[in-house]
Image (cartoon, grey):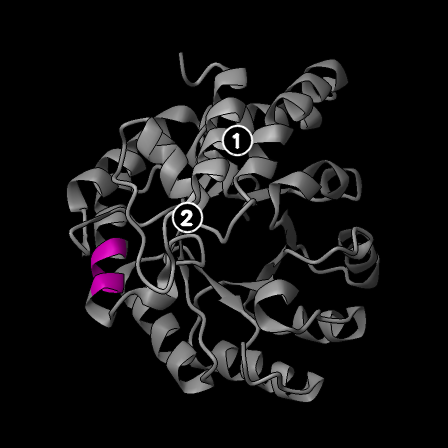
Amino acid sequence: MFSGSIVALITPFIQDQVDEGSLRTLVEWQIQEGSQGIVVCGSTGEGALLSHLERQQVLSVTLEVAKGRIPIIMGCSSASTAEVVAMVKEAEMLGAAAALVMTPYYIKPTSEGIYQHFQAISKASQLPILIYNHPGRTGIDIPISLFERLVALPTIVGVKDSGTDMRRPLQLRQATSKPLCFFSGDDPTLSAYLAKSGDGCISVTANVTPKLCQDMIKAWHDQDLTGFSKLRDLLFPLSEALLLETNPSPLKFAVSLLKKCNNEVRLPLVPVSSTTEQQIREAMHTIGLLT
């Protein structure tokens, strides 16, 4: 259903309000540069810090600009199952192509609790769901036995995985005959994920260099290993630099250097240190993004 480089889009702000003009520019730029989809209101989009009306605004504007040219996926995550159900229903009503749903954070439910969380969401809406496994933000790394149960739910169409077990896509493909898509959730692990039958990346780095991110995945699928290796090595320092401090603070700084948004995040996030700024500048200069 989904593949390639899907950007986990930032939410631009101006004086603590959603910067709709910059958002429109970013969405159009991503489409023109070849991104195969856009996730809005995820962790990179500061989704947990947006109000209900702001989430509606971001999704509606993104859908309006995209005009069906690429799929728009809505981040729908919360510690509360009831809240996620409401988010997913609204995303379906507004016209999102799918919802990206993280395992509940802070609560640390059991495997059965996680299963029933996704089961309730699946029963409440027909919107396709991508499971988001992010142990660093939730404290839970979904075991393969639970994944096998979850992907059997009728609306589950794939997985975004920010875990460290690169066997997972291959294990799941062998454990089920259901067609599924598997995405790396961290740009530095993409090469390993593709080698283990992954379909692409829901990418932070694509906010800065969308064309090269998509070109790298295309080179892999075209079996152009020379081109793939060159792009992998070129992008790796930037991907590492964008993870030096809490996402999306480094990313907002990088995109601001491209003059596409303000370097503005919401508390409790803060702008990055001068040391991190310098490392990001150096990585972007190496790629040729800055002169």
- Disc 1, SS: helix
Q: Is residue 195 above or below residue 180?
A: above
Residue 270, percent across and down?
A: 37, 54
Residue 106 as seen in the image, left or right of residue 20: right
* Residue 263 drawn above or below residue 129: above
Image point (27%, 63%), residue name? 55
Label 1 vs 2, first from the N-terminus = 2
Nearest to the observer: residue 188 or residue 214: 188
Position of residue 35 in the picture relative to residue 24 (left or right)? right
Image quadrant of residue 208? top left
**Residue 280 seen in render:** yes
Does 88 appear above or below 206? below
Rendering coords of residue 80 (x, y %): 45, 84
Mark 1, other Cα within 10 Å: few <14 / some 14–19 / many ≥20:
some
What separation in Å lies between label 1 and label 2 (alpha carbons)?
Answer: 13 Å
- Residue type marked 1: Gln
Please indicate whether residue 118 sits to the left or right of residue 31 in the image. Answer: right
Tell me which segment is drawn in magenta.
Answer: 54-58
Question: Which residue is label 2 attached to?
Answer: 249
Judging depth in this view, the residue of 138 and 277 nearest the camera is 277
Would you name the residue on which mark 1 appears? 279
Badge nearest the viewer, 1 or 2: 1
Most prominent secondary structure in the magenta stretch?
Answer: helix
Farthest-out residue, top? 291
User: Which residue lies at the image location 65% right of the left edge and 56% below the top edge?
Assistant: 161
Q: Is residue 92 visible?
A: no
